[in-house]
Image (tube, helix red, strand yellow):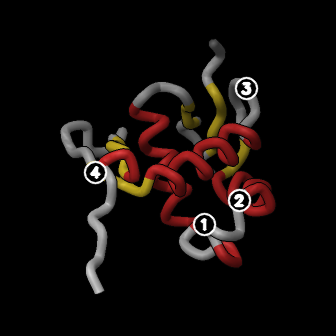
Amino acid sequence: MVKSMPDADDKITIESVTSPHHVQRVDRKKYTAMRHSLLGVLPAGAPGITIADAKAKLLQHLPEDLFPGGDKAGWWLKAVQLDLEAKRVIGRTADKPLRLFKHAD
């Protein structure tokens, strides 16, 4: 059986606010689904919501075929969070527990 190579369009390059010069290629469908779900639950502006609250809220919006039973949702949440912070789409508070929010347009 011959395995087909993944199409370049199947991957997306992401950044990290904590490692500015490091990029990573990840699955486009999973990234896009998590990004959409995360942005759908984050409030606009500070104080925002905790990461635990964001995860609890977004789990119900993730496609079951990509995240069966929420599998790997924590890793994807963190990857998308750091990428969106690097792109200045979302921000975080400085206090503990850390809270996330969407930047105003």
Task: Report which residue position mark 4 lands on.
Answer: 24
**Residue 99 quadrant:** top right
* Numbered badge on residue 44: 3
> Disc 2 and disc 4: Cα gap in Å?
22 Å
For the residue marked with disc 2, what is the amino acid?
Leu
Crowd rating for badge 4 (residues with CA inside 10 Å; few <14, some 14–19, many 20+)? few
The tag earlier along the polypeptide, 3 or 2, is: 3
Task: Report which residue position mark 2 lands on.
Answer: 62
For the residue marked with disc 3, what is the amino acid?
Ala
> Where does the image place residue 13, in percent across and percent down from the top left?
32, 43
Left-right relation of 81 to 5:
right
For the residue marked with disc 1, what is the amino acid?
Leu
Q: Residue at x 69, y 47 (%)?
A: 37
- Secondary element under disc 1, as helix, strand or loop, is loop
> Where does the image place residue 26, in percent across and percent down from the top left?
37, 55
Q: Are marks 2 and 4 in contact (CB under 8 Å)?
A: no
